[in-house]
Amino acid sequence: MSGISDTERMITLKTVEGTLFDVKSSIAKDLKTVQAFIDDSDDDVTSPIPLPNVFTRELSRILDYLNNHHRFRSGIEKADEEMARYDAEFAKSMSHEELKALILAANYLNVKDLLEFLNQTVADVIQNKSVEFVRNFFGIENDYTPEEEEKLRNENEWAFNGVEQD
Amino acid sequence: MEKLIKSLFQCFFAPRVRKSQIRRSCFASLPVDIITDIFVRLPIKSVLICRCVCKYWNTFISDPNFAKLLFTYTPPAIMIRRRCYSRIFHLVEYDRIEWHERRNNLFCLSLFEVLEPNNSSSIKLDPKFEIFLPNPKSIQSKRVPPLHVRSCNGLFFMSSSKESDYSFVCNPITGEFIRLPKQPPILTPCEQISWYFGFHPKTNQYKVMRIHIFKQDHRMVVEMHTVGTSTWINIEVDYPKHLTYLFKHPTYFNGALHWIGIDVDRNASIWAFDFDTEQFQFFSNTPKGQSKGTILKFRGSLCFVDFNELLISMWMMKEYGVGESWTPIFLYSVTTSQLPGCMAYLDRENQEFMIFSTPWYDCKVHGKFQVLCHVPTLIPLKNIIIGDNVKIHTIMLMSYFDCLIIVFSYSIVFAKLVCGNPWRYRLESTAASAARLREGKEKGYIHGEAPTAGTARHGTAPRGWDVADREKTMALLREENGGAEVWVTWSLDGCRQLRGERGL
């Protein structure tokens, strides 16, 4: 169809569960993985693009974030404060599980700004927390023997001062 | 029929199982760039904690390449120490979470109210750690030598003015240090001798300088040592006749050291020694021409904090080297009734901060302290110091166990013990503070008879003894005290009370 400009085009994305999301192509540009797929296709992409690693919950959140940020950026001067407030709420609204799932999805879709924001959120969560907390958060198994761990802790004993107890 | 049920089962349940399994296992093995991005956003303390999480993370964090990357992201932190012979440094890193709530950017800081953590105007200082350095064998006296400390580009330079072969370059975070070669004899008579530490970015070498200033002859003798080499080299430097006084603590920035100097007309100006040209020359005027000020590095620029009567102003040199580019950043008025001794300025957007003392800080009341701008680094010394025969030692960085300390005015009750070393404790108390202790107002102390003021006891902690075992420690002290109970507090800054040695 001629006469439709690029910014009005809608892209359809399909999640693992089969849910379809219609996304403006200007937003889709921030999903670099998707954009690469579009660029690689010879013809216009009309059928839904399947995202085999992305679940509905995550895509919905990502699109929510991107839509809001686009709105803030194109809007009036005061947007910085609003954006900060939105970001804080966004981070708070997720459980640790949801945060981790979102990072994986944002990484797969290559959404740079959101990923940086999420990584900072994780850093804030694990900052000044104990080793056990960090292990639990990342789901990492401890492969140290008690002696090895003791030795390692002693090397940097001062770093463990004042760490928040679980 | 069975087949149908089986396939229905698979269709119905399998996707859900797959979902959570995928999610859980994937996060544990995150891609390297995500882990890196998370680590570089952490304070150095948390990065060290992450080393203990698992072997892969330990290898990852211990990799010098990661350490180098981390260093480029690490914002400047502050190291504070009390007194010139203290070996305890308090590391203050930018605390994103703790300081997020603070409304103002500039606020008064009560440094030593850190001991009363409920004071809302104080920044929480955390962690504390002590650098143990070997005492030179030649020191016969029982005094702990004063230690000059300078920081530059992630490393400390430490020296004692009394002993010419007692100087080190160390990384306080990793505990690695190297001894510097013996300095040439001091030229006498000389009014001003000082030690400085710098970095030459073009050659990536650290430089230690010793400067003699002979005011009568208007002469400045500069001896330079490149860390990693084995000699000190004399550098001819012109000392201008009209410069009457050079303030003692220069600031390193951008490959040069910058001092505040006063000339014959009593004007303050900034002078610099550039490690590239090896020249000492006039650098720039101060923004306001006052003599009371501090040069700082902040937000990647050279800054000047000016104190004029009751006005504190901070200026930033937007273009390095251009005197006209001094731009005001903030202005703060104090009142005679509220003279802050120490202040902090936060730049929340860039997550940087600085701490500076003011001319109203009363050394006699609170004691002297030193603020060092320091960028913590995990880079191993062997990757930083280039040179033949560079021998790297490690010191153990210890924290004191249990830092619950109450300091009463006019009385300090303490004991200090380090495993395997001679120790001593001095008990001093006034009747009032003794009463407080007796009333049980302080936790964690053993109460008993108030000791006589000025009693000093000393002994030797047996080797292999676990210093962290309070019960054993108390038992030993009780024994030393002839079976009577003792008043003990665990002192963090033992050097303050200890008038004697801390041999190693």
Image (cartoon, coloured by chain):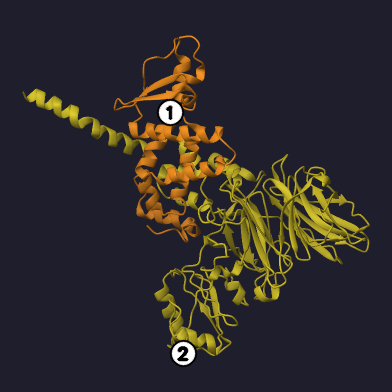
Q: Nearer the viewer, residue B466 or B27?
A: B27
Residue at image point 57% right, 58% down:
B91
- In the image as oriented, which residue stretches furthest toward the left? B1
Answer left or right for B442 relative to B379: left
What label does residue B48 carry, if any? Answer: none
Q: Amino acid at mark 1?
A: Leu
Would you call the spot at circle 2 few (<14 residues within 10 Å), some (14-19), or many (20 or more)?
A: few
Report helix, strand or loop for mark 2: loop
Q: Position of residue B192 (x, y in %)?
A: 83, 64
CA distance for labels 1 and 2: 70 Å
Rendered hue of chain A is orange
Residue position marked by numbered label 2 in the rendering = B449
The quarter of the rendered structure image containing the N terminus of chain B is top left
Q: Quadrant of residue A77?
A: top right
Q: Nearer the viewer's eye, disc 1 or disc 2?
A: 1
Q: Which residue is mark 1?
A: A109
